[in-house]
Image: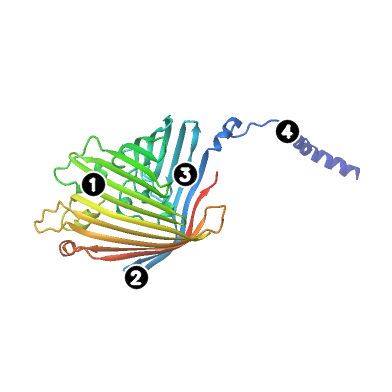
């Protein structure tokens, strides 16, 4: 027995010694991964996983085509203040192809990557990649809340690199924002390729100027975001964009209405160009788009919310060389009824059922000259929406 005791003592002595050494070292002061002096910054920083996942069912002209589970939206976001007068925001979309851009040197999957500096009590300077402030609440709404976009926001470059200067009046009910941005994320050749019309050449200053006014009236019940934007797309080839966004809040009802008008010397959205491509190999010139977007939200119970979105877009081609032309080529309509259930009162997560229905009505001229065919598409979704705030 004594022999075994000596044996086990010799065997376990190094382990006890090592454990004692580790315990002694554990009692010493260890430098944390994040210095204590920096921990105070975290209280002003948010880390968010903007998420929408669903079981989607797709329909074309009333016929079911397929069903599958999808991560519709997953945008990682970090934002906050890193100094009393300096803040930042970064958001990357992982449900978009991360193709690099040859214009602004940042992937198109990055929505925002900017720094904002308070240069005066009511004046802010923002530099980096940001959302184009051309107004409209459809674009300003968190993308995880939008099941489908109207044409202009769906087809446009909405996140661009540049600089912005914003100023708020003393009453904070009126805010003005001026932006100077790149007019696109791709080079002119990458965007149009062989479809560039004869006589159209690239410009040395592909920039966009945006002026925006945000107002608040009647104790915040009515809010507006109006803007005018001017884009230089090519030499002597420009784009004019007007957007009028309106928001009304009353008790349990929130109502939005956006009106948008885009006049384009060279078709940037590509809708008209796609209609006429069977006869004209070049991108359409002198086009314009007019659209309306309405969204109503009504809380029928503490945890139940009803939503209805209506949208309409009209596509016109003024540059048609046909003397018997009809300018109006396409009218599209959309309706999105949705019901949301929020099971937690202290956590922003919603289960939803929504149906996206869109109808495309081509003019008789488009049907007869470009073989355009009317059609409908639908999407029935069962899923969850959650801006997961993890920090």
> Which circle's residue, 2 or 1, is located before the other in the chain?
2
**Relative side of 294 to 28, left or right:** left
Q: Which residue is mark 3?
A: 77
Which numbered disc, 2 or 4, marks the residue that appears first in the sequence?
Answer: 4
SS at mark 4 in the image: loop
Judge by depth and name the residue closer to the eye, 136 or 388.
136
Look at mark 2 in the image and give the residue it sits on.
Answer: 63
Crowdedness near tag 4: few (<14), some (14–19) or many (≥20) residues, C-alpha within 10 Å: few
Q: Which residue is mark 1?
A: 192
The residues bearing labels 1 and 4 have C-alpha atoms spaced at a distance of 66 Å
Between 331 and 72, the one lying in front of the other is 331
Which numbered disc, 3 or 4, marks the residue that appears first in the sequence?
Answer: 4
Q: Is residue 196 above or below residue 68?
A: above
Which residue position holds label 4? Answer: 27
| Secondary structure found at label 3 | strand
* Image location of residue 364, percent across then percent down: 17, 65
**In the picture, residue 71 is in which quadrant?**
bottom left
Task: Identify the mark nearer the N-term, 1 or 3.
Answer: 3
Give above or below for 382 relative to 271: below
**Extreme-front residue of the structure:** 218
């Amino acid at each position: 027995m004594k022999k075994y005791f000596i044996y086990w003592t010799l065997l376990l002595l190094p382990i006890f010694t090592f454990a004692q050494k580790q315990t002694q070292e554990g009692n010493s002061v260890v430098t944390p991964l994040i210095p204590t002096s920096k921990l105070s910054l975290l209280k002003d920083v948010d880390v968010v996983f903007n998420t929408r996942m669903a079981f989607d069912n797709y329909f074309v002209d009333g016929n079911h085509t397929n069903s599958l589970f999808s991560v519709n939206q997953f945008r990682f976001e970090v934002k906050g203040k890193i100094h009393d007068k300096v803040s930042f925001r970064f958001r990357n979309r992982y449900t978009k192809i991360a193709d690099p851009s040859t214009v602004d040197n940042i992937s198109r999957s990055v929505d925002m990557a900017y720094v904002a500096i308070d240069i005066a009590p009511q004046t802010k300077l923002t530099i980096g990649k940001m959302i184009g402030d051309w107004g409209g609440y459809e674009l300003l709404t968190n993308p995880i809340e939008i099941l489908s976009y109207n044409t202009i926001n769906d087809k446009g470059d909405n996140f661009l690199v540049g600089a912005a200067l914003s100023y708020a009046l003393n009453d904070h009910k009126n805010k003005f924002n001026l932006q100077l941005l790149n007019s696109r994320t791709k080079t002119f050749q990458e965007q149009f390729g062989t479809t560039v019309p004869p006589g159209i050449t690239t410009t040395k200053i592909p920039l966009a100027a945006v002026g925006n006014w945000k107002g608040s009236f009647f104790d915040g019940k009515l809010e507006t975001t109006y803007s005018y934007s001017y884009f230089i797309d090519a030499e002597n080839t420009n784009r004019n964009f007007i957007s009028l966004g309106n928001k009304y809040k009353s008790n349990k009802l929130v109502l939005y209405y956006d009106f948008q008008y885009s006049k384009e010397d060279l078709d940037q959205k590509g809708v008209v160009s796609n209609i006429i491509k069977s006869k004209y190999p070049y991108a359409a010139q002198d086009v314009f788009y007019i659209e309306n977007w309405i969204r109503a939200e009504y809380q029928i119970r503490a945890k139940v919310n009803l939503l209805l979105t209506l949208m309409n877009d009209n596509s016109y081609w003024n540059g048609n060389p046909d003397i018997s032309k009809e300018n109006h080529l396409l009218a599209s309509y959309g309706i999105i009824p949705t019901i949301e259930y929020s099971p937690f009162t202290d956590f922003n997560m919603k289960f939803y059922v929504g149906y996206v229905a869109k109808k495309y009505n081509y003019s008789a001229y488009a049907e007869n000259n470009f073989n355009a065919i009317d059609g409908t598409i639908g999407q029935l979704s069962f899923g969850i929406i959650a801006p997961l705030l993890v920090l």
